[in-house]
Amino acid sequence: MKHLDDTTLTLTQAASAFAALGSEQRLMILQTLVRAGPDGLSMGALGERTDVTGSTLTHHLKFLTAAGLVEQAKRGRSIVCAAVAYDMINELSEYLLRNCCADADCHHTDSEHRHG
């Protein structure tokens, strides 16, 4: 899995990731993978849970993978699994909140954004 430890997203990278989430089916696929946890799901299980199968599922996974939101790997002999790139999702959240309230009179802390 890619780690974004010391790097920050560029505007282009963030725009690509957000664009990939601009499809209801892709957002549903990502949410399903988040619910499945770090082990991800096989393509078959992902298709069953989302009711998106075959070439349509492959098409959406290509977008999510290209945007860095999903990673795919072979497990065993032939089952291809998909898992969420949690580092990327965290980086997207941080990207949105990085300059929060910079131009406002009142300033919020990170914990206020997470809980309030």
Image: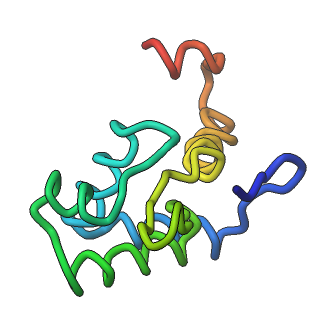
**Count of numbered circles in the view:** 0
- Give the farthest residue toward the front: 77
Name which residue lies at 58% across and 66% down: 68
Q: Position of residue 104 (x, y in %)?
A: 60, 31
Q: Quadrant of the C terminus?
A: top left
Position of residue 94 in the picture relative to residue 39 (left or right): right
Q: Position of residue 105 (x, y in %)?
A: 62, 24
- Give the farthest residue toward the left: 51
Nearer to me, 52 or 16: 52
Q: Quadrant of residue 30?
A: bottom left
Rendered position, 86 above or below 100: below
Name which residue lies at 72% across and 61% down: 9
Name which residue lies at 54% across and 14% down: 112
Name which residue lies at 52% across and 62% down: 76
Q: Quadrant of residue 99?
A: top right
Q: Position of residue 4 (x, y in %)?
A: 78, 53
Nearer to me, 16 or 4: 4
Q: Quadrant of the N terminus?
A: bottom right
Nearer to me, 41 or 100: 41
Position of residue 20 in the picture relative to residue 1 (left or right): left
Colour scheme of the rendered structure: rainbow
Rendered position, 21 above or below 109: below
